[in-house]
Image: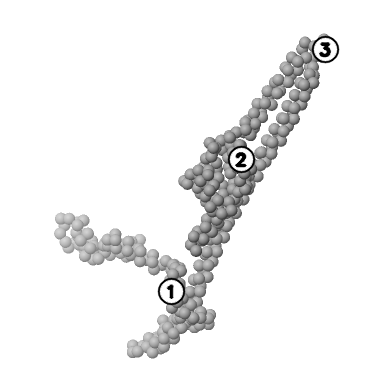
Amino acid sequence: MMSELASSALRVINAAWQHGPSYDLAAQAAFALESAHLLQSSETAAELERLRERATATPAALPPEQRAAIAAHLATVKPASTQLVAGLAKAVHDVREHEHPQWEDLYCLNLLSYMGERMGPVLRRLLDAEARVAALETDLTVKRQYAEAAATVAELVQQRGERMKVENALRDEVEELRSRVAELEARIAAEECCCPEPAPLCEGCRCRCHAQEAAPLADGITQRIAPVQALRESPAAHLAGLLSGSQPDVTAAEVLDDRTIRLTVRPHDYTAWRDWLTRLRVDVATITARGAVTTGTGEHQGVTVHLLGEGVTGLMLAARDGEDR
């Protein structure tokens, strides 16, 4: 179905074509539409759209400085009661709905005067409501940040628990292999013979037989524990042990590979955290904060260090508050 505006445009174009020159129908139609005020520029259309959005948009909350200025103007005015608000609503209705005379409208003037005299308490009530909304929004933001931080900590704790299970399983396997190696070494030391011949007849093959039996098994065990042993003796393990034993801020030091560790610290103040960043040469571009946990990647003694700081966000905020004072 054609809209009213399109129908008007169609009527204007038909009239122009019937009564005007026929040499340029397109130009004639455009001129006719413009003469009938049915055309508008893109700027006008955009401005109309902005006005429509402004008319239908939800009013923005008062900024803190504006609330403070209004409070200063109201001084000691008390907030309006529920009965007063209901009475003012009825007064607005009466002003709008009553029959307005052609002469001086005393009824409207009295109602408007009544509402104007009581606008101070209404503004105070509105101001108090705005303050409560702002406080609730701030509280909601803080709770959301705490929830995100708690989720991050829970995830890190879960990951650490899984790594500890793997480390414990590897530790038990290494201990079992060491026990087996010790058993084989004891058998070699006792020169146990694998030959079925009586002792006097196998003097020449005792060491050779036992060596043939024990060598393949010992080589397999050595191959299995070699990666674990190499990791224990790596630069990363040496650095992890050094930092864990000498720094009270360190809560965990995990060896990820022979050249990488994850170091978890809980510094006592923001200066201590900055010392860690400097000491480990943490790249500023890698520093990220998620809730109360801050991470970054640096390098020390040829080992890559993934630094994880617990509670750093609170320390940074406390340091800023101290500078502001």
- Quadrant in the picture for the N terminus: bottom left
Across and down, in percent, residue 227 comes to 63, 30
Q: Which mark is residue 197?
A: 3
Sooner in the amino-acid sequence: mark 3 or mark 2? 3
The kind of secondary structure element at disc 3 is loop
Is residue 17 shown above or below 256?
Answer: below
Residue type pointed to by label 1:
Ala
Is residue 208 shown above or below 217?
Answer: above
**Number of other residues with Cα within 10 Å of mark 3, as a class: few under 14, some 14 to 19, many 20 or more:** few
* CA gap, disc 3 and disc 2: 56 Å
Foreground residue, 80 or 204? 204
Q: Which residue is mark 1?
A: 69
* CA gap, disc 3 and disc 1: 109 Å
The kind of secondary structure element at disc 1 is helix
**Number of other residues with Cα within 10 Å of mark 2, as a class: few under 14, some 14 to 19, many 20 or more:** few
Q: Is residue 165 left or right of residue 140?
A: right
Is residue 43 shown above or below 231?
Answer: below
Across and down, in percent, residue 109 comes to 39, 87
Residue type pointed to by label 2:
Leu
Where is residue 139, by image quadrant?
bottom right
- State yes or no: discs 3 and 1 in contact (Cβ < 8 Å): no
User: In the rendered image, is residue 290 in sight?
Assistant: no
Sooner in the amino-acid sequence: mark 1 or mark 2? 1
Q: Is residue 104 left or right of residue 274?
A: left
Which residue is at 20% across, 61% downward? 31
Across and down, in percent, residue 317 comes to 52, 58
